[in-house]
Image (cartoon, rainbow, N blue to C red):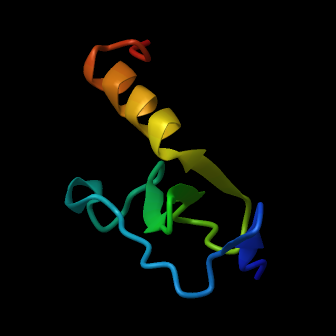
């Protein structure tokens, strides 16, 4: 497993999944707050790719989600 992304050491990351995900989540992600970054990965593929966001990028994403910006 790659534990460093964009210079960010993820070897000790505390990955968390929403309590609303349920035991059989098909489309869930995990989030870890590491140093000044926010890392996101697919919970079904923990050794796969990781997206890394700055705090400002994360805030914009969460705000857009709350405002319905990504509703289909």
Q: Nearer the viewer, residue 50 or 22?
A: 50
Q: Nearer the viewer, residue 52 or 35?
A: 35
Extreme residue in the front direction? 36
Count of marks overlaid on the render = 0
Please determine whether, in this image, residue 46 is positioned above or below residue 41. below
Q: Please tell me which residue is depicted at 57% across the width and 58% down the height of the picture.
A: 42
Extreme residue in the left direction? 19
Is 64 on the left-hand or right-hand side of 19? right
Q: Quadrant of the N terminus?
A: bottom right
Please determine whether, in this image, residue 58 is positioned above or below residue 41. above
Quarter of the figure with residue 14? bottom left
Q: Nearer the viewer, residue 22 or 68?
A: 68
Quarter of the figure with residue 17? bottom left
Extreme residue in the bottom direction? 12
Q: Nearer the viewer, residue 21 or 53?
A: 53
Q: Please tell me which residue is depicted at 63% across the width and 52% down the height of the picture.
A: 52
Quarter of the figure with residue 72? top left
Query: Residue 46: percent from the left, percent from the top?
Result: 61, 72
Query: Residue 16: percent from the left, percent from the top?
Result: 36, 68
Query: Residue 25: percent from the left, percent from the top?
Result: 39, 57
Is 24 on the left-hand or right-hand side of 35? left
Query: Residue 23: percent from the left, percent from the top?
Result: 30, 68
Q: Please tell me which residue is depicted at 48% across the width and 48% down the height of the picture.
A: 27
């Amino acid at each position: 497993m790659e534990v460093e992304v964009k210079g960010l050491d993820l070897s000790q990351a505390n990955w968390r999944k929403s309590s609303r995900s349920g035991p059989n989540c098909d489309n869930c992600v995990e989030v870890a707050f590491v140093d000044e970054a926010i890392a996101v990965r697919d919970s079904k593929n923990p050794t796969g790719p990781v997206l890394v966001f700055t705090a400002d990028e994360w805030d914009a994403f969460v705000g857009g989600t709350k405002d319905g910006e990504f509703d289909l």
